[in-house]
Image (cartoon, rainbow, N blue to C red):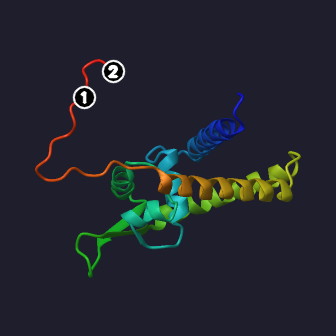
Amino acid sequence: MDNPCLEVISLVERLHRQFLEVVKLELEGFGIHDINNVQAMMLFNIGDAEMTVGELTLRGCYLGSNVSYNVKKMVENKYLAHERSVHDRRSIHVRLTEKGIKLRDSLTVMHQRHAEMLSRAALSADDLQATSVTLRRLERFWIRAADLVQRPRPLAPDSSPPARPLFA
């Protein structure tokens, strides 16, 4: 690939998919079949916190469009408990159940095992720190780039969109 930026994007995406595959294999090794790898990582990222479904995305616990579906499945399978907020009845708070805490603890052990393996894989803590710094810079860049995107202005209430040629 000629564009280093596109190469990094592609690599990060592949690394994420590969990591989720490892989580899937861990779940199978635990004999767990009622939660998927994405849901397991959501659960891991919630940790000891109690948060709203909206906060799951804002805090970086989940990336995707089907947060509500995954939360619903984890509640059904008793990994998460949920309750409506007393202050805002539209808002639902979630937290781990005992079953969720046990899985989170198993995933913590997995992460610790991987950290030990990394030290034997010619990847130092400095390597990972430098990578993290670079990825955070890219994140800030894309946040700023998104702010600069020219979004179409809404039409006035009584105006119609401009005519477009049929063949352009």
Q: Are marks 1 and 2 in contact (CB under 8 Å)?
A: yes
- Residue furthest to the bottom: 87
- In the picture shown, does residue 123 fall above or below 89? above
- Residue furthest to the left: 158
Residue 73 vs residue 6: left or right? left
Q: Quadrant of the N terminus?
A: top right
**Visible in this render: residue 62?**
no
What amino acid type should be assigned to the residue bearing mark 2? Ala
- In the picture shown, does residue 48 fall above or below 142? below
Q: Report how far apart the C-alphas of labels 1 and 2 lie in the structure.
A: 8 Å
Where residue 14 sits in the image (x, y, percent)? 63, 37
Where residue 67 sits in the image (x, y, percent)? 39, 53
Element on which disc 2 rests = loop
Residue at 20% across / 40% down in the picture? 161
Residue 48 vs residue 87: left or right? right
What amino acid type should be assigned to the residue bearing mark 1? Arg
Q: Which mark is residue 168?
A: 2
Residue at 69% across / 56% down in the picture? 111
- In the picture shown, does residue 163 fall above or below 29? above
Q: Residues within 10 Å of mark 1 (few under 14, many from 20)?
A: few
Residue at 29% across / 18% down in the picture? 167
Residue at 65% across / 60% down in the picture? 108
**Visible in this render: residue 164?**
yes
Residue 105 vs residue 148: left or right? right
Asked whether 121 or 99 is in front, the reply is 121
Asked whether 161 or 120 is in front, the reply is 161
Disc 1 designates what residue?
A: 164
